Amino acid sequence: METIFCVLVGIFFAAGIYLMLSPRFVRILLGISIFGNAVNLLIFTTGRLTEAAPPVLGSAAAWRAANPLPQALILTAIVIAFSFFAFLLVLAYRAYESLDTDDVDEMRLAEPKPVRPPLGY
């Protein structure tokens, strides 16, 4: 079971990095989202995938229970990632409104040219 999850994490990492290298801002946002989900799935996989067993201390089935700490970390990460994605989405929309493009290279051309300081002292 862990092998399937590891392959899935690898696919998510590859797709996320591929999309983050794109010049379009929307693809970059989707890449960041997929990358975050890959990290969450990796943390979940490291918490040991087992059958449903209640984590009750003192019972004989306690050693088969999954570690609840990665699951708590993932729930926190999902909330933070969602708020981060919403902020980046609003930022991208505002940049698109003001510059009429979602291409990162064209956005860089909209910046003013740097002023070089005089060379004579």
Image (cartoon, rainbow, N blue to C red):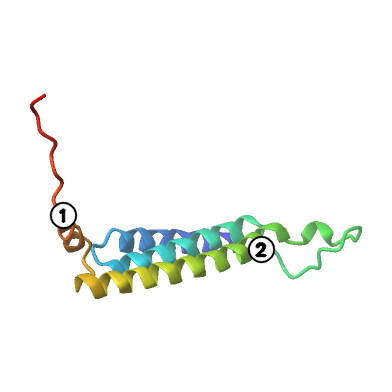
Q: Tell me residue 9's x, y (percent).
A: 48, 61
Q: Is residue 65 left or right of residue 57?
A: left
Q: Residue at 43% of width from left, 66% of height from top? A: 34
Residue in front for this viewpoint, 44 or 4: 44
List x then y, in percent, for residue 59: 90, 61
In the picture as drawn, the residue positioned furthest to the right comes out as: 58
Closer to the camera: disc 2 or disc 1?
A: 1
Residue density around tag 1, few if under 14, some if 14–19, many if 20 or more, within 10 Å: few
Left of 110 or right of it: where is 48?
A: right
Question: Residue under circle 2?
Answer: 71
In the image, 64: left or right of 60? left
User: Based on the displayed image, in which of its 4 quarters is residue 86 positioned?
Assistant: bottom left
Q: Quadrant of the C terminus?
A: top left
Amino acid found under the numbered disc labelled 2 = Gln
Q: Inspect the image, locate mark 1, and give the three-letter code of the amino acid beneath it.
A: Pro
- Residue 37 visible in the shown view: yes
Residue 6 vertical position relative to residue 119 in the rendered view, above or below: below
In the picture, the quarter occupied by the N terminus is bottom right
Q: Which circle marks residue 31 in the picture?
A: none
Name the residue tied to disc 1. Answer: 112
Kindly report the distance in space between the C-alpha atoms of the residues bearing marks 2 and 1. Answer: 47 Å
- The spot of residue 65 in percent (x, y) is 77, 62
Question: What residue lies at 70% left-to-right and 57% top-to-bottom?
Answer: 69
